[in-house]
Image (spheres, rainbow, N blue to C red):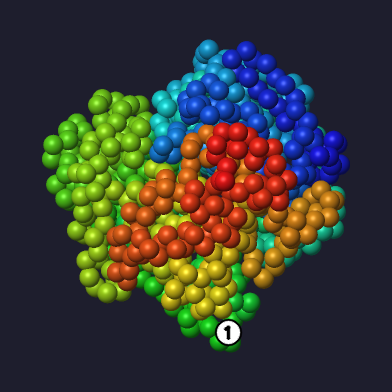
Amino acid sequence: MNNTVPTYGYVGKIARLNLSNCSVEIIPTSKYVPEYIGGRSVCNKIFWDQVPPGTGAFDPENKIIFMTGPTTATGIPTGGRCVFTGISPNSFPEQYAWSGIGGWFGAELKFAGYDGFIVEGRAPEPTYILIEDDKIQFLPADGLWGLLVHQTQEKLEKLHGKNVKSIVIGPAGENLLRNASITTSNDNVAAKSGFGAVFGSKNLKAITVRGTGAVYPAHIDKVFELRLKMGMPSMNPNPLVKEETHGMDGNTIPVEGGWIRGQVACSHGCNQRCNRLMLNMKSAFSDERINQIEKCVSIFAYGFQEDCSWSPIQSFETEQNHFLACKMLSREEISPDSTDPFFDELFKKVPGDIVNYWRPDFDKGSVMSNLCNEYGLDKWDVIVWYFTWLSMAKKEGLLDDLDFGMEVDVESEEFVKYFLDMITYRRGKYGDIFAEGMARAIRNLGKEKYGDTIYRGRYSQITGERLDIPVSLETAWGHSYHWQGRGFEGAIYKPGWLATSLELMTVTRDVQTVAHFHDTYQNYLEYKDDPCHSPTFVNGVILIENKAEIKDSVTSCDWQSPDLFWGDMEAQMFAAATGIPITEEKLDAAAERSRLLFRAILIRNFNRDRNMEVNAIFPTMQYPDPWGETVTWEDWNDLVDLYYDARGWDRKTGWPTRDTYEKYGLKEIADELERLGKLPR
């Protein structure tokens, strides 16, 4: 292990912050890097070393581990992204998970001299942490507790100056909603794992940072070169525009007087503009018009009659036509190459299912998004799960015996306000039930009736037939469908949804913020008829999973990576930031090491094995995709066998072998697991 931190990219310190006794310990970053790269990889190592089995999400012993990467604050595109990890209260059951976040907070933390921090313990009273270079204070949060997210940010700027950067929770986190988020500038959030509730359980309202230092990349010329090559580097001015309609596909609605939008980057130094700045939107709290910044899922708050469409270029690409991960083909910088021999197949649009959840309503959608932003709620769970469930359950007559105190009407702005207020503040019986998240709420109510009842309002636009699906869009680990061929963003060919399901099977949360499946169209043609028995398909899934580890470690984002035809892009990013030469193969080995650590944590702390995984994911694939297809038990298990073999994991248990751990320098991990009886013989 390297005993000194590299001169460039990293800044050298990790702060261990104990809320129980207000103590601070400084850990040298060199204890972990460059072996563990940064970001999620370092978080995994810290968690393995410090959090024992039996720890619950709301226990003081649970730790929120936050890490930047070596590219953070260097000017390398999307290098401002950062990662939280810890035991997730939103996973079902509770398990170790992660959550990414953009914004300027990570860069400011590095300017203050810290590559990351570990938050542990529980403050006796509401508290926030102020970091100003070498000075770290634990301060009373009496004047902040109970405030909305934006009020909290504004109050912190009033107290400490406009140049501070903060991460904060809203009332949802304070009241331990299991899907509460942590928010920073421009409504960038860490949402998927419910870490806002972990902040709340620790009586931690916010962490505020001001840094006066600098972060130096090793090769500034290389940084400039990357800025001109990565993603969509046109860097054109992005003027505000007025649009007459809002929505997509069957959800489009005219907007009286039009609406104004722009595009903004989410993180420090980024030259991409994938977030929508929406001006003069309706507020949930006053008559004053507000501005909001929204990402992809928000568009369905405005209307959800039809699922979004899909084209193969969103997952399968050629050297002539390979774009960004999100494939936003309407952007003027993208010019598809029509001479590509696969052009027609790549750009064929597949229509989404008719789902009939709610009709378009611009003001109601604005209010729904605003409530999530201000309460600190995972917008994904609210839009894709809470309200789809309410819609389907009411249409199937399941809510007749439930008295929420107001008539359920997902198309009513007043009901949206009422329901989200009810769960945020845990008002009454059903406020408490739904504050536990949909997976737990459905089991509390009775899963057979309130989860498994078939919704009869979904229709395929491909076959014209009705497609059965449960009123709950639950898939595995307490999360909702996403790119899995049904439920939401489902118009995706079978190899795509099998890949997404395989990715989800081995983790603890929806991974489609960082691991959208991509492969070459030539590979797709090889395995499209039988992906469950294709080593090529399995290797494609593993490549995407490893790229996700790299993105969350170097750091980068799903908007620009992976580039299947520029395989060493992330290695070039790492070398430009740190000055440490690294090959694509060595960076991939670092991703494998991080992945194995994550696997070992799940095995040691949460008893993960093959039986648990296969049974968690398989049932959700028995409902038809838009073509009416499912997967058999035999084919799914054949695919799992191929995947475990390629990973070096034992087929029977799903546990990595000693040889696999030792190949990546993790002998001590294998030794501990063997002592616990969790290493395959």
List x then y, in percent, for residue 134.
Answer: 77, 24
In the image, residue 401 sits, relative to residue 242, either above or below, namely: above
662 displayed left or right of 416: right
Q: Residue at x 13, y 36 (%)?
A: 401
Q: Residue at x 62, y 22 (%)?
A: 129
Disc 1 target residue: 340
Q: Residue at x 56, y 46 (%)?
A: 680
Q: Residue at x 83, y 39 (%)?
A: 2
Asked whether the viewer can see residue 113, the reply is no
Q: Amino acid at mark 1?
A: Asp
Q: Nearer the viewer, residue 335 or 346?
A: 346
Disc 1 is placed on an element classified as: loop
367 displayed left or right of 212: left
Q: How many marks overall?
A: 1
Quadrant containing the N terminus is top right
List x then y, in percent, for residue 110.
Answer: 74, 36
Q: Nearer the viewer, residue 191 or 448?
A: 448
Can you tell which quarter of the image residue 619 is in?
A: bottom left
Can you tell which quarter of the image residue 237 is in?
A: bottom right
List x then y, in percent, for residue 193.
Answer: 48, 39
468 displayed left or right of 509: left
How packed is label 1: few (under 14 Cα within 10 Å), some, or many (20 or more)? some
In the image, residue 187 sits, relative to residue 640, either above or below, namely: above
List x then y, in percent, for residue 116.
Answer: 69, 34
**Residue located farthest toward the front when viewing the structure as drawn:** 681
Asked whether the viewer can see residue 616, the reply is yes
